[in-house]
Image (tube, helix red, strand yellow):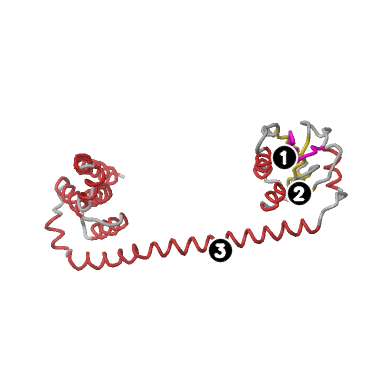
């Protein structure tokens, strides 16, 4: 367990800082290993925002308790909201305050301590609820894609028999890659659909070159969306981008398929 003691100097003989936000140093004490780390607070002398920076510094050091002279209500609230107990109205040297804390001689506000634990519980429950809500929303958003994938598999099995695929994809590396690039260019939809079709093609004996070309061109080329792209980005840009993507998809697919076959 770690505690932080605000101080005016870099050693345990220094006085406890009067104010938390403007403390020049934080003495981070690991009560389990008795190790003390003195951290300089670089924002102690700044005119504005010093309290926030000191709060962030304490949180980053993962302390459970802060010992100080005075802590304003706003800073106390921020610390307690992050599960850090604040014990104030302390004076003397850092060494003396640490010893008093170890011996349980520092009076703790039971109400404040209970509030810290209560807030920890509230934060945990709130985080859980937020995570569940986020997961549910993501699932709802994915439902149309999942339904589309299932329908796509059914349509593909119905309208693309194996004899038709065998007549299109003959096993020639160059021709198969060209056909795969062409198919990916004219088809449209979520990128996930290209993975589904690619898997179906592989299971039916279509070469890896054709499947790789299909996936690349599906993602990078969009002949169906070409009119919208031309209207948004300009005719010249849209045509040039799609043409270059088509040309580049072929060698990339051949190189990828060759490397995978070797591996």
SS at mark 3 in the image: helix
Badge 1 or badge 3: first in the primary sequence? 1
> Relative to 210, does residue 149 appear above or below in the rendering?
below
| Left or right of residue 188, residue 142 in this image | right
Query: Which residue is situated farthest in the left direction here?
Result: 167
Badge 2 or badge 3: first in the primary sequence? 2
User: Pointer 1 and pointer 3: residues touching (CB < 8 Å)?
Assistant: no
Residue located 59% across and 61% down the image: 126
- Whole-angstrom CA distance, mark 1 to mark 3, is 33 Å
| Nearer the observer, 224 or 35 | 224
| Nearer the observer, 162 or 93 | 93
Magenta part, dominant SS: loop
Whether residue 41 is in magenta: the answer is: no
| Residue that numbered label 3 is attached to | 129
Q: Of discs 1 and 2, which sits in the foreground? A: 1
- Whole-angstrom CA distance, mark 2 to mark 3, is 28 Å
Q: Which residues are magenta?
A: 16-29
Q: Which mark is residue 21?
A: 1
Residue 111 percent location from the top left of the image: 79, 59
Q: Of discs 1 and 3, which sits in the foreground? A: 1
> Relative to 9, does residue 31 appear above or below in the rendering?
below
SS at mark 1 in the image: loop
Label 1: how many Cα within 10 Å (few below 14, some 14–19, many 20+): many
Badge 1 or badge 2: first in the primary sequence? 1
Residue 226 percent location from the top left of the image: 21, 49
| Residue that numbered label 2 is attached to | 86
| Left or right of residue 254, residue 137 in this image | right
Label 3: how many Cα within 10 Å (few below 14, some 14–19, many 20+): few
- Whole-angstrom CA distance, mark 1 to mark 2, is 13 Å
Label 2: how many Cα within 10 Å (few below 14, some 14–19, many 20+): many
């Amino acid at each position: 367990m770690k505690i932080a003691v605000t101080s005016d100097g870099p050693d345990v003989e220094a006085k406890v800082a009067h104010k938390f936000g403007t403390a020049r140093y934080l003495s981070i004490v690991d009560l389990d290993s008795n190790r003390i780390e003195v951290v300089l607070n670089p924002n102690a002398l700044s005119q504005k925002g010093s309290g926030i920076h000191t709060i962030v510094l304490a949180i980053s050091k993962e302390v459970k308790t802060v010992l100080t002279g005075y802590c304003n209500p706003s800073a106390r609230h921020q610390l307690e909201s992050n599960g850090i107990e604040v014990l104030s109205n302390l004076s003397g040297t850092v060494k003396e305050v640490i010893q008093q804390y170890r011996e349980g001689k520092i009076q703790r506000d039971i109400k404040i301590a209970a509030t810290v634990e209560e807030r920890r519980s509230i934060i945990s429950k709130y985080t859980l609820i937020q995570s569940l809500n986020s997961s549910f929303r993501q699932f709802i958003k994915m439902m149309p894609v999942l339904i589309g994938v299932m329908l796509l598999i059914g349509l593909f099995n119905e309208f693309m028999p194996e004899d038709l695929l065998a007549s299109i994809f003959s096993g020639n590396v160059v021709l198969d890659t060209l056909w795969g690039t062409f198919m990916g260019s004219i088809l449209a939809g979520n990128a996930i659909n290209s993975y589904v079709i690619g898997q179906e093609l592989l299971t039916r004996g279509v070469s890896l070159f054709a499947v790789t070309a299909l996936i690349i061109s599906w993602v990078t080329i969009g002949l169906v969306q070409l009119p919208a792209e031309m209207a948004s980005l300009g005719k010249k840009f849209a045509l040039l981008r799609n043409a270059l993507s088509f040309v580049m998809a072929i060698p990339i697919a051949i190189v990828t398929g060759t490397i995978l076959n070797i591996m």
